[in-house]
Image: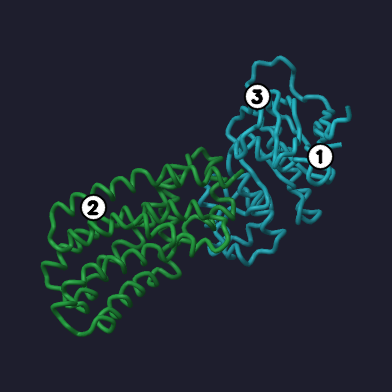
Amino acid sequence: MKRPYAVTMTGERQHARGSVTRPLLRFSNVALNRGGRLLFEGLDLELGPGDGLHVAGPNGSGKSSLIRLAAGLLPATRGEVQREAATLADDSLALDRELPLARALAFWGGETALAMEALAIDHLADVPVRLLSSGQQKRATLARVAASGASLWLLDEPLNALDAEGGERLARLVQRHREAGGAVVAASHQPLAGTWRRLELGE
Amino acid sequence: MIGRLIARDVRRGLTGAAWLPIAFFLLVATLMPFAIGPDAALLGRVGAGALWIAALTAALLPVERLVEPDRAHGILDQLALRGCAEETVAAAKILAHWLTFAPLLLLAALPASALLGMDALTLWRTEIALVVGTPGLAALTVAVAAVTAGMPRAGSLAGVLVFPLAVPLLIFGAASSGGNSGGLLLEAAISLLLTAGAPFAAGAAIRAARS
């Protein structure tokens, strides 16, 4: 019987297997059904400190659903999802549009000044969010993630609307976060810089 | 986080069109003498009831701005990721909504009572009834705002949902404005029930809207 989907995982885990550290994200035999369509099933994965997982696949294969599942915003149809404190960057800005950028970011707390500097949007601190370009808004979303202090980053199409320079800054942030013991799940149909384990959905 | 959310919602409620529900409230009070006629005794009798209907519509006016923008912009999702329960978020929104319309409403009731020719005692009773009843109105509005978030023509739908549910509050609120102390107790009971139940209804609605 031909399966309408495939889950293939490639790449080595970066930290020692069998270490006692608690996983930051664990899927145990997870299946997800959306609108009567089975997106994936029997999915097991475990991310520890330093891990990065690149979720790839064509449009509609369930990349965003997997991210929302990991975020706890969607319930799994079967199986179990466990995670540590996570932060999410997706298409929604989650910043008050009428406020200046610095104040809008400050609502979510954390090291916002450093994060804005890391994404080169610190000169926009006093500009209302609604006036930012879509690339600048994407940088603001990523600054919110970087400032959050959460150990698990969930990024849904993080490269959308980013220019090459922004992509490099994101790669550096991700690298630094992983070196500091964090984990990153990024859903993207574009290649990501650095070393990633790869999860291919819906082939 | 929840304290920041309340402060933010109050700021958003008060900037922009905070005066609009109050202007609406005063407008209804102004129109009553024109609709009923300048009979002072009659106006004094229906005045409290008119104020209650005005209060209900004033509470309902910002219903589309209470939950839907936060759902659409992913703010509710981010709050969930920060570990805030949807029920807590809804309770914060109820408190913030009450803070943005009720104190102004209580102030606006002073000129409105003059327009309606209400005596000082009726005004005093109405103010007390409004203090007791407005938390219930705020809770009901936020719950309905959460249920209708993301639906087309949510504003009109919210009106259709809120008005029947607000009828008990209206009956006993207007009765206690008229000097019925049993009415005040029943109004307090209904307001308490709405305020206690609404966060759970709104929380469930926010979760249901995600999938």
* Disc 1 and disc 2 in contact, CB within 8 angstroms: no
User: Chain letter of disc 3?
Assistant: A
Q: Nearer the viewer, mark 3 or mark 2?
A: 2
What residue is drawn where x is 56% and y is 40%? Answer: B81
Could you classify mark 1 by the number of other residues whose Cα lies within 10 Å: few (under 14), some (14-19), or many (20 or more)? many
**Which label belongs to residue A99?**
none
- Neighbour tally class for label 3: few under 14, some 14-19, many 20 plus, Cα within 10 Å: some
Establish if B41 lies above or below A131: below
Chain B colour as displayed: green
In whole angstroms, how far apart are the C-alphas of marks 3 and 1?
A: 22 Å
Callout 3: SS: loop
Q: Secondary structure at mark 2?
A: helix
How was this image coloured?
A: by chain
Task: Tell which of B166 and A110 is nearer to you.
Answer: B166
B112 left or right of B41?
A: right
| Distance in Å between CA atoms under marks 3 and 2 | 52 Å
Indicate the chain coloured cyan by its letter: A
Image quadrant occupied by the N terminus of chain A? top right
User: Is residue B167 toward the left or the right of residue B77 in the image?
Assistant: left
Which residue matches tag 1? A56
- Disc 2 marks a residue whose amino acid type is Glu
Q: Which residue is mark 2?
A: B187
Residue matched to label 3: A23
- The answer as to whether the residues below labels 3 and 1 share one chain is yes
Mark 1 secondary-structure assignment: strand
Q: Position of residue B177 (x, y in %)?
A: 18, 62
**Mark 3 or mark 1: which is in front?**
1
